[in-house]
Amino acid sequence: NAGVTQTPKFQVLKTGQSMTLQCAQDMNHNSMYWYRQDPGMGLRLIYYSASEGTTDKGEVPNGYNVSRLNKREFSLRLESAAPSQTSVYFCASSEDRGRADTQYFGPGTRLTVL
Amino acid sequence: GNSVTQMEGPVTLSEEAFLTINCTYTATGYPSLFWYVQYPGEGLQLLLKATKADDKGSNKGFEATYRKETTSFHLEKGSVQVSDSAVYFCALRRGNQGGKLIFGQGTELSVKP
């Protein structure tokens, strides 16, 4: 099992450029999540998907869009990148079966917006 | 609203020292509580969890007890190793908000030989 995979690992964009971060999981999980990690702020939820075909905003959704393409894949799109979106992005998945549910994280994408 | 507060880092210890990383939370109801660990250059992985008051989570020599009276979930280890150097995140999950986690800001631990 590969678990949760993310591509690319690193990316540098110029302000105004667009890009899509890809995420896939092979654990047959229902729920998937996108977080951003900034120094001193922990992880903050951008968007999540409780099941295929559904998505919901998290704490910091502005400037992002998501697509739950199928049960395995959950992509995050930046339509017009801004320097404030420089961050490390993590995708996660879980079965979401109750209080003890464990989230499994990918290795992250380090994005720099110039 | 719901929130998690951790002690500021970085924390620097010598090998075999005792570790405590404080975590307190604010939430209505009865959240589940988690500790995740992030090793350098990697994603987060679950270290331990507790789902109700007085539960003790444990793994790899780490322990944390869910204390509802003090709204705390402090992480402890009796004897740290260099390989424990990482960033530790405390998190909570509200029962009625799906799988969403709320994270603390993280505490960096550095263990010196």
Image: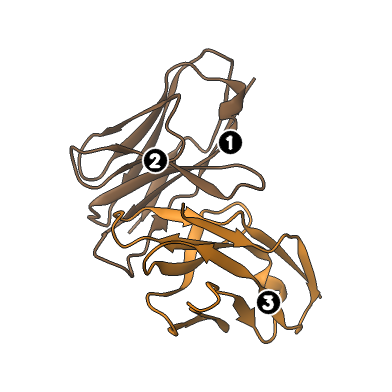
Q: Colour of chain A?
A: brown
Q: Gap in Å between the C-alphas at discs 1 and 2?
A: 16 Å
Image point (49%, 61%), residue name: B91
Which residue is the site of mark 2?
Answer: A58
Q: In the picture, residue A19 is in which quadrant?
A: top left
Where residue A52 sits: x, y (%)? 19, 42
Q: Position of residue A76 (x, y in %)?
A: 38, 32
Of labels 1 and 2, the one closer to you: 2
**Crowding near the residue tagged with mark 3, few <14, some 14–19, many ≥20 C-alpha atoms within 10 Å:** some
Q: Position of residue A82 (x, y in %)?
A: 56, 20
Crowdedness near tag 1: few (<14), some (14–19) or many (≥20) residues, C-alpha within 10 Å: some
Identify the amino acid type marked 2: Gly
Q: Locate residue A88 relative to residue B18 in the image: left or right.
A: left
Name the chain under label 2.
Answer: A
Instruction: Give the drawing colour for chain B.
Output: orange
Q: Residue at x 55, y 76 (%)?
A: B70
Q: Secondary structure at mark 3?
A: strand
| Residue at x 63%, y 56% (from the top left corner) | B40
Same subunit under labels 1 and 2? yes
Amino acid at dot 1:
Ser
Residue occupying the far top of the picture: A16
Question: Of helix, strand and loop, which one carries label 1?
Answer: strand
Q: Give the residue number, with chain letter if any, for mark 1.
A: A87
On the rendered structure, is A84 left or right of B101?
right
Q: Is residue B18 above or below residue B99?
A: below
Residue drawn at the location 72% of the way across and 60% of the way down: B8
Chain at tag 1: A
Give the quarter of the figure containing the C terminus of chain A: top right
The residue carrying mark 3 is B20
> In the depicted view, which residue is nearer to us: B75 or A2?
B75
